[in-house]
Amino acid sequence: MIPNPPRTAFLSAAAAQGASTLDGLGMLVYQGAIAFQMWTGVEAPIPVMRRALEQVFGT
């Protein structure tokens, strides 16, 4: 799974052929959320984290 860029040429070509695709943002968000919770003991703000990554990666 590649988080950046979220839409690779491979994923674009697969989608054009009708395949279902997933980018790596979800994996990156949840890996970060687990680490955040382990280090802070606080539940991670997953929607906030996802929006922040989408803004950084321009999606």
Image: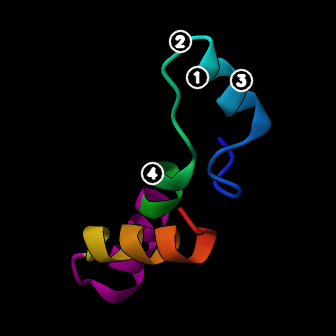
Cα separation, mark 3 vs mark 4, equals: 20 Å
Cα distance in 3D space between marks 2 and 3: 9 Å
Q: Amino acid at mark 1?
A: Ala
Q: Which mark is residue 18?
A: 2
Measured in 3D between alpha carbons, the distance from the residue under mark 3 to the one under mark 1, in whole angstroms, is 5 Å
Instruction: Return the residue at label 3.
Output: 13
Within-10-Å neighbours for mark 4: few <14, some 14–19, many 20+: some
**Of callouts 4 and 2, the N-terminal one:** 2
In magenta, the rendered stretch is 30-43
What residue does disc 4 label?
26
Label 1 SS: helix
Query: Are circles 2 and 1 on residues that touch, CB within 8 Å?
Result: yes
| Pointer 1 residue | 15
Is residue 33 in view? Answer: yes
Q: Which mark is first along the chain, 3 or 2?
A: 3
**On screen, 46 above or below 39?**
above
Circle 2 SS class: loop
Reply yes or no: does residue 6 show up in magenta.
no
> Which residue is at 58% across, 23% downward?
15
Cβ atoms at labels 3 and 1 below 8 Å apart: yes
Residue placed at 71% from the left, 23% from the top? 13
Q: Going by the picture, which residue comes out furthest to the right?
A: 9
